Image: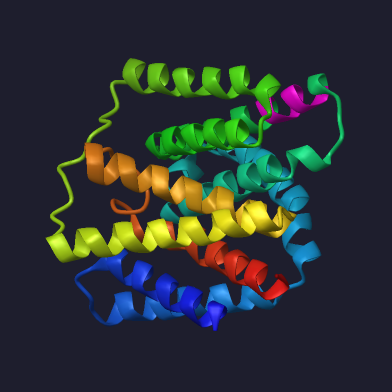
C-alpha cells in the first residue's frame, strides 16, 4: 500500500513538472515511471555500488569535454553531464559515513569529485544547477553531523556564488507561470516525498533510504529556490533533464520502502 502511495505521488510530481500535457510529455512521464519501477526492482547493493562506475564516468566526462570541445554544445552530452554530476555526488556523499576513511582522504576525494562535477557543468553551460546541489550537500552533511566536512561544503557554496557572479550568468529566470493549484501540487508532492524519505532515513538509516533522502532534500532546495526566489534551477526550468534525475531517484525511494 505504501509503495502504491509513493508511486502515485511520483506520478503527480512528474505531471506537475510539465503541466501543459501533450503526447510527447505523456510518453516521457510513462518512461520515467517505468525507469522508477525498474530501479525499484534492482538489488540495493547494485544501486549503491553504482557510485564507483558513476564517479569514474564523471571524471572521464571531464577529460572528454576538455579534449573534445565540440561535445560541449551537444544536448545529449549535457543531459549525461547532469545525470553523472547528480548521482556521482549524491551516492558518494550519502555513503561517506560508511567508508571509515580518514578526514584527509574524505576531503581530498570530495574535493576532486566537486571539481570534476563542477567542471562538467561549466563546460556544458549548466553551472547554475550546481548551486542548489552544493547547498543540499552542505545541509545534508549538517544533518549527518559531519561537522569536519562542513567548511569544505560551505566553501563550495560560496565558490559557486562567486563563479556565477564573475561569469555574469543569469541566476534568475523569467518566473514560472504556476497557477495556485499547480503550485500547491508540486510543493505538496515534494514535501510529502521528503517527509516519507526523512522518516525512512531516521527509522532505518540504510544506504538506500539515505540516498533517497538526499535526493528529495535536493528536490526541495531546488523547488524552494525556483518557486520562492525565481532562481533558474533544474526541476521547473528543465523538466526533461529533471526526469533523468527524478525517475531513478523515485525508484530508489520505492526500493527503500520495499526493504523496510
Instruction: Say which residue appears at 23% left-offset and 79% top-offset.
Output: 22
175 lies above or below 7: above
Is residue 109 part of the magenta span, yes or no? yes
Determine which quarter of the picture holds residue 185: bottom left
Nearest the viewer among 181 and 63 is 181
78 lies above or below 108: below
Tell me residue 38's x, y (percent): 62, 78
Instruction: Say which residue appears at 23% left-offset and 76% top-offset.
Output: 21
174 lies above or below 241: above
Tell me residue 110's x, y (percent): 69, 30
Quadrant where the image shows the C terminus? bottom right
Nearest the viewer among 155 and 77 is 155
Instruction: Say which residue appears at 13% left-offset and 55% top-offset.
Output: 177
Nearest the viewer among 33 and 225 is 225
Tell me residue 244's x, y (percent): 49, 61
Q: Is residue 158 left or right of residue 21?
A: right
Q: Is residue 137 left or right of residue 44?
A: left
Q: Would you say the magenta stretch is mainly helix, strand or loop?
A: helix
Determine which quarter of the picture holds residue 66: top right
Tell me residue 108's x, y (percent): 75, 23
Nearest the viewer among 149 and 169 is 149
Q: Which residues are magenta?
A: 105-111
- Number of marks in picture: 0
Amino acid at each position: 500500500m505504501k509503495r502504491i502511495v509513493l508511486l502515485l505521488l511520483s506520478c503527480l510530481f512528474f505531471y506537475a513538472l510539465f503541466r501543459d500535457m501533450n503526447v510527447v510529455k505523456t510518453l516521457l512521464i510513462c518512461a520515467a515511471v517505468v525507469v522508477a519501477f525498474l530501479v525499484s526492482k534492482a538489488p540495493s547493493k547494485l544501486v549503491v555500488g553504482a557510485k564507483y562506475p558513476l564517479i569514474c564516468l564523471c571524471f572521464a566526462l571531464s577529460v572528454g569535454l576538455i579534449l573534445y570541445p565540440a561535445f560541449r554544445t551537444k544536448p545529449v552530452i549535457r543531459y549525461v553531464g547532469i545525470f553523472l554530476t547528480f548521482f556521482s555526488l549524491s551516492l558518494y556523499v550519502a555513503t561517506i559515513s560508511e567508508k571509515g576513511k580518514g578526514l584527509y582522504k574524505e576531503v581530498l576525494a570530495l574535493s576532486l569529485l566537486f571539481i570534476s562535477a563542477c567542471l562538467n557543468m561549466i563546460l556544458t553551460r549548466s553551472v547554475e544547477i550546481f548551486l542548489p546541489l552544493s547547498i543540499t550537500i552542505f545541509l545534508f552533511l549538517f544533518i549527518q553531523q559531519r561537522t569536519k566536512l562542513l567548511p569544505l561544503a560551505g566553501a563550495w557554496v560560496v565558490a559557486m556564488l562567486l563563479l556565477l557572479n564573475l561569469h555574469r550568468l543569469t541566476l534568475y529566470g523569467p518566473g514560472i507561470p504556476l497557477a495556485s493549484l499547480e503550485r500547491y501540487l508540486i510543493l505538496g508532492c515534494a514535501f510529502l516525498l521528503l517527509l516519507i524519505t526523512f522518516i525512512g532515513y531516521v527509522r532505518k538509516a540504510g544506504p538506500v533510504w539515505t540516498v533517497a533522502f538526499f535526493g528529495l532534500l535536493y528536490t526541495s532546495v531546488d523547488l524552494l529556490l525556483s518557486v520562492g526566489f525565481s532562481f533558474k534551477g533544474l526541476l521547473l526550468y528543465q523538466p526533461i533533464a529533471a526526469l533523468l534525475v527524478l525517475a531513478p531517484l523515485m525508484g530508489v525511494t520505492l526500493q527503500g520502502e520495499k526493504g523496510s
